[in-house]
Image (cartoon, helix red, strand yellow):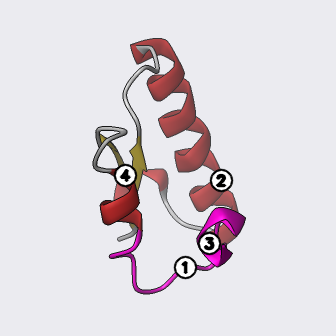
Amino acid sequence: MPHVTVHIVPGHSEEEKQRLAQRLHQTVQQELNMDGDLISVAIREVGAENWPAFIRTVPDFYVRPKYLDK
């Protein structure tokens, strides 16, 4: 029962967030060959001023942003 959480900075429209959630849902369903009824997606906003501290708390990147290597 996968749950995907995406953290983003504010400023994206509800339509953009809805579209992103649907595409993530479809991708998880296809890549893991799972029933879509078992998959959930959440999008959470983190203020830009809090982003640097927040992103450094992520322990297990599968894709690490290059700006953290500076």
Residue type, numbered disc 1: Phe
SS label for mark 4: helix
**Are dots 1 and 3 in contact, CB under 8 Å?**
no
Residue type, numbered disc 3: Leu
- Check residue 61 in the rendering and tell me which mark sits there, or answer none: 1
Residue 11 in view in this figure: yes
Q: CA distance from mark 1 to mark 4?
A: 15 Å
Pointer 3 local density, CA inside 10 Å: few below 14, some 14–19, many at least 20: few
Q: Is residue 64 magenta?
A: yes
The residue sitting at 29% across, 38% down in the picture is: 47
Height in image: 13 above or below 55? above
SS label for mark 3: helix
Residue type, numbered disc 2: Thr
Q: CA distance from mark 1 to mark 3?
A: 19 Å
The residue sitting at 39% across, 76% down in the picture is: 58
Pointer 1 local density, CA inside 10 Å: few below 14, some 14–19, many at least 20: few
Residue 4 in view in this figure: no
Residue type, numbered disc 4: Trp
**Res 2 quadrant in image:** bottom left
SS label for mark 2: helix
The residue tagged 3 is: 32
N-terminal-most mark, 2 or 1: 2
- Check residue 51 in the rendering and tell me which mark sits there, or answer none: 4
- Check residue 27 in the rendering and tell me which mark sits there, or answer none: 2
Residue 63 appears at what percent x and percent y?
66, 73
N-terminal-most mark, 1 or 4: 4
Q: Which residues are magenta?
A: 56-70
Q: Nearer the viewer, mark 4 or mark 2?
A: 4
The residue sitting at 66% across, 77% down in the picture is: 69
